[in-house]
Image (cartoon, rainbow, N blue to C red):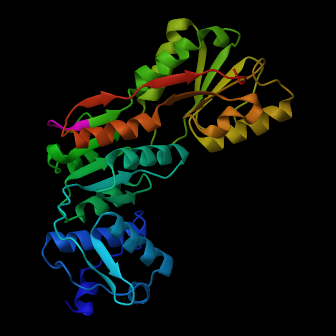
Amino acid sequence: MKINDFFSYLQVDEYSAVPKYLQLTKSVLTALEEGRLKKNDTLPSINELSYELEISRDTAEKGYKHLKNLGILGSIPGKGYYILNEDYNQKLKICLMFNKLSNHKKLIYDAFVDAIGEHVAIDFYIYNNDFNQFKDLLTAKTEQYSHYVIIPHFLESDAHEYEILNTIPKNKLILMDKMIAEVTGDYGAAYENFQQDIYQALEEALVPLSKYKMLKLVFPANSYFPVEIKKGFSKFCQQYGFNQKVISDANREPINEGDVFINLMEDDLVTLIERIKTTKLDIGSQVGLISYNETPWKKVILNGITTISTDFRKMGIIAANLILENSRKQVEVPFYLTLRASL
């Protein structure tokens, strides 16, 4: 095989969130599957690979090392790299789509990748809560994926995401984090029950909440958060007789003794902490704070921030297992209250 032919098989997507060394690995495995690479074919040197693909030498070397660990490549000092084994049948090619990057999304990604195993190709895309970007990315994916694993959250209130999702064969579809009622057929899911989760979590916190007068949910305008969160919040307040308020701007809402703020966004939590400090009110006795989504730093700031959160690591593992087990179960992910000093 000519070296120039080899480079025609390689694809490195600058806009993909998949590390370039894994994209290189995937290209080689795809070429093997399609018979374009054969046993004993010689591959370019590390330097040639780095120059032609405009990637770092470390990236090129890491890609080859990964292929050697898979048993695909061999190397002879002074002669370079060659295909050692072409009998590699890669069955799983996954299109993984997240709405955004965040600390808890990283927990999902890491758990999913660890659970799915090494011998799997994953193309990872971020669509920034933008429906049009999501649609463009998904409709442009003409490659045959074995599975599409998607977190479907959008800023647009009129997004008809179900129309796009319903074009995916249901035996290939796994939804994570959120269910879409209009998506039909028998597909897998690892999801949160947003209305029931916040209701039950606040119910578990009933004793510390009882010393407060007003519960305020900070629900940003034009956000991707499901309206079911507001429904569950309102249901709890009505059931247990709490004054309630849904606010959209944490910067402007008055802070009074007896208030409890429940925030969804990390930025709003920082804003609230800064503003409460200026009032001289004590967090945890005069004003309460509850934050969505558990992250490591919430364990230590202000002696601990109370959180209500799904188990993001569990979500990633469930989604991976649905693929590995060829299952179309729809699994509700556990949701937890973690009481700390802020309440």
Residue located at (57% from left, 7% from top):
241
Is residue 145 or residue 236 the one in the foreground?
145
Where does the image place residue 164, in percent across and percent down from the top left?
Answer: 22, 51
Residue located at (24% from left, 64% from top):
141
In the depicted structure, whether residue 57 falls above or below residue 339 = below
In the depicted structure, whether residue 331 falls above or below residue 49 = above
> Which of the 4 image quadrants contains residue 115?
top left
Where, quadrant-wise, is the N terminus in this rendering?
bottom left
Where does the image place residue 208, in percent across and percent down from the top left?
Answer: 66, 12
Count all numbered tags in the image, as a single digit. Answer: 0
Magenta run includes residue 98: no
Is residue 327 or residue 148 the one in the foreground?
327
Query: Is residue 158 among the parts visible in the rendering?
Result: no
> Which of the 4 image quadrants contains residue 290?
top right
Where, quadrant-wise, is the C terminus in this rendering?
top right
Is residue 241 or residue 93 the one in the foreground?
93
Dominant secondary-structure state across the stretch colored magenta = loop
Residue 6 horizontal side relative to residue 285, left or right:
left
Residue located at (16% from left, 78% from top):
38
Q: Which residues are magenta?
A: 184-188
* Farthest residue, direction right: 280
Where does the image place residue 279, in percent across and percent down from the top left?
Answer: 84, 30
Residue 64 horizontal side relative to residue 201, left or right:
left
Query: Is residue 16 among the parts visible in the rendering?
Result: yes
Where does the image place residue 31, in percent across and percent down from the top left?
Answer: 20, 74
Residue located at (32% from left, 47% from top):
116
Residue 230 horizontal side relative to residue 217, left or right:
left
In the depicted structure, whether residue 78 falls above or below residue 24 = below
* Farthest residue, direction front: 77
Magenta run includes residue 185: yes
